[in-house]
Image (cartoon, rainbow, N blue to C red):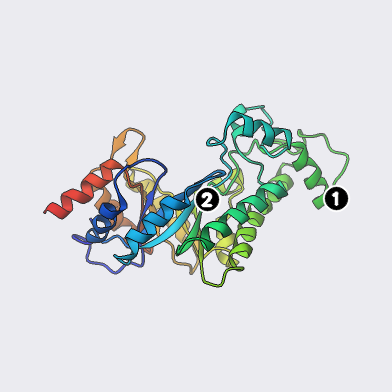
Amino acid sequence: MPSLILQVLISISGVWSAWNYTTIDWEELAPLLSENGYDTVFYCAAYGLLTDIDGLNECIDACNEYDIDVHAWIVLWKTTTSSDEEREILADDGRLQVATDHDTRAQSWLCPTNPENIAEIASMCLRIAGSSNVKGIHLDYIRYSSNRVCFCEGCRGRFLYDTGIYGINWPEDCASGGRLYDRYNQWRSAAITSTVSSVRDSLHRLNKVVQLSAAVLPREREMDYFAQHWDRWLSSGLVDFVVPMNYTLSDSELVDWGESQLRLTRNSSIPCGLATNQNDYLFTEDEIEHQQRMAIEMGFDGWVMFHLSNHFISILRSNVRL
């Protein structure tokens, strides 16, 4: 692992701590991460509308002793942690995504253009940052679930109002293959960027500096499909950094994705998101170390590992015993 093997200067050596994947106490995890050279934890403090501020503060208290920065990891839009009754209310209020093919999976996501949803996300980020000593807010799923959403009536009205375009066939004209598809995709992308901007504005209300970052998809072609133009967030200063999720076992894919990402970032420094497992396959320590070396050699400013699973914890423990 990095502190024992890689003798390089990196600005971030981090790990995502996912929702309910380990029951190990942070009093044990914090020194274990520190002894392995990790200086940053992205703790899942919110999943959809459900928050875990108590758990976040436990993580922060333990990590502070070892100079480990903690960012509050916010999983946006998901309502899978909400009750059926709560989702029914959200649906009745027009706050859920609607797909052109009526895919019911889309209905578990909040609509990213709904002003009430955006305000609630920004308020939640402000509340979490204001009630804890976090280094930053880290946005995840800051995108649409596919290019087939959202086509709710609220999106129809807001799109027509914002563009001044009327007399359209909805949703056919704006869906894939429609005459306004490109224009609608641009509007969707602007809506996601607007959410990032709203969160940034909310953090500016605090009497302290709180970084804003995002976990982003790895392929450039995915930017239009999911309306996640993270390169623009960086260039405009909306986010301090992004972490591309380069989860692959393939060296050629890692190089292909990584070189494209570094080109898009221009002069911005970003860490590389790497996996500890892919589907049912568990990465070995050598494979993890190999990809970390590749990330540094390509020019990434460190890495963030997904995620602090029991498998990864066992690797960290084996290093301490050496």
Q: Position of residue 30 (x, y in %)?
A: 29, 57
* Closer-to-camera residue (132/121): 132
User: How many numbered marks does the figure carry?
Assistant: 2
* Residue 43 against residue 151 in the figure, above or below: below
Q: Quadrant of the C terminus?
A: bottom left
* Closer-to-camera residue (305/85): 85
* Residue 240 against residue 54 in the figure, above or below: below
- The answer to whether residue 234 is left or right of residue 293 is right
Within-10-Å neighbours for mark 1: few <14, some 14–19, many 20+: few
Within-10-Å neighbours for mark 2: few <14, some 14–19, many 20+: some
Regarding residue 283, the answer to whether it shows in the image is no
Regarding residue 56, the answer to whether it shows in the image is yes
Q: Quadrant of the N terminus?
A: bottom left
Going by the numbered disc 2, the residue's amino acid type is Glu
Which badge, 2 or 1, comes first in the chain's sequence?
Answer: 1
Marking on residue 220 = 2
- The answer to whether residue 115 is left or right of residue 312 is right
Residue sitting at x 30%, y 60%: 38
Kindly state the secondary structure of the residue where label 1 is placed: loop
Residue sitting at x 45%, y 64%: 133
Marking on residue 128 = none
Going by the numbered disc 1, the residue's amino acid type is Gly
- The answer to whether residue 142 is left or right of residue 282 is right
Q: Position of residue 314 (x, y in %)?
A: 22, 45
Kindly state the secondary structure of the residue where label 2 is placed: loop
Q: Which residue is mark 1?
A: 164
